[in-house]
């Protein structure tokens, strides 16, 4: 495996990696193969993704992430390392990696989300968005070798008792096994797409 110029297989795209097809017997969906093409393009320096960095929701999340971590530290009095550097996977150090929001002690991670107020309240009441980020969390646990992740939903506009909502997500070995197999196949697809692109560049 080798990302080289770019095109890292990352935790933020883990849900795409786990996407199946519309038919029952289709193990891999269109989203999976589109992601493979996106990675292949990135590895030759061609970014075909949509730039979402200017979206207000993204800016809001970036601006408030540190407040969420600070609030977490105040509540749990934990040994938290924030921010953290990009962490490559030890078996695939050139192509697979992630950047957790924070480390907790020697076993844990924090994954912070700062959603709009409606979604935050839904998270407080029934963890509405947790399933959307389960694959991302397990990807990070796979890469880092850690045992658990505290999924955090944070809204500084909410009343103090519900500003910070935390759910402990344990490492799921069965899920990680499937994820790792799909990552290996994804890398194969990326290399196939790279060859097709390179043929057109001659």
Image (tube, rainbow, N blue to C red):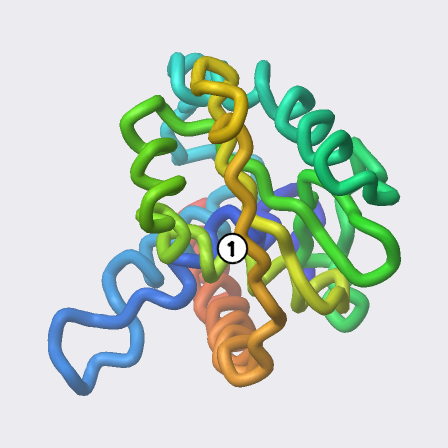
Q: Is residue 29 shown above or below 133? A: below
Q: Is residue 185 shown above or below 62? A: below
- Residue occupying the point 70% across, 63% down: 143
134 lies left or right of 119 = right
Question: In this orientation, which residue lies closer to the viewer: 86 or 140?
Answer: 140
Question: In this orientation, which residue lies closer to the viewer: 127 or 160?
Answer: 160
Residue 120 on image: x %, y %: 38, 32
Residue 54 on image: x %, y %: 44, 13
- Residue occupying the point 69% across, 35% down: 72
Quadrant of the image for the N terminus?
Answer: bottom right
Image quadrant of residue 122? top left
76 lies left or right of 9 = right
Residue 104 on image: x %, y %: 79, 49
Q: Is residue 170 shown above or below 34? A: below
Question: In this orientation, which residue lies closer to the viewer: 118 or 29?
Answer: 118
Image quadrant of residue 94? bottom right
Residue 1 appears in the picture as rendered: no
Residue 33 appears in the picture as rendered: yes
11 lies left or right of 129 = right
Badge 1 crowding class, 10 Å Cα cut-off, few under 14, some 14 to 19, many 20 or more, is many
Q: Is residue 39 shown above or below 174? A: above
| Label 1: which secondary element | helix
181 lies left or right of 88 = left
Q: Which residue is mark 1?
A: 136
- Residue occupying the point 15% across, 83% down: 24
- Residue occupying the point 58% across, 14% down: 63
């Amino acid at each position: 495996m080798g990302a080289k110029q770019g095109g890292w297989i990352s935790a933020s795209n883990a849900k795409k990696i786990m996407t199946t097809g519309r038919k029952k017997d289709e193990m891999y969906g269109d989203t999976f193969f589109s992601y493979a093409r996106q990675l292949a393009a990135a590895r030759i320096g061609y970014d075909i993704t949509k730039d979402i960095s200017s979206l207000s929701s993204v800016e809001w999340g970036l601006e408030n992430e540190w407040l969420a971590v600070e609030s977490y530290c105040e509540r749990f009095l934990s040994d938290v390392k924030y921010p953290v550097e990009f962490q490559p996977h030890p078996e695939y150090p050139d192509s697979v990696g992630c950047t957790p929001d924070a480390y907790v002690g020697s076993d844990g991670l924090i994954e912070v989300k700062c959603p709009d107020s409606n979604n935050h309240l839904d998270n407080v009441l029934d963890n509405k968005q947790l399933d959307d980020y389960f694959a991302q969390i397990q990807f990070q646990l796979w890469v880092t070798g850690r045992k658990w992740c505290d999924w955090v939903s944070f809204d500084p506009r909410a009343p103090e008792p519900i500003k910070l909502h935390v759910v402990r997500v344990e490492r799921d070995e069965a899920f990680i096994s499937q994820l790792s197999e799909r990552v290996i196949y994804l890398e194969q697809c990326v290399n196939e797409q790279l060859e097709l692109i390179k043929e057109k560049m001659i």
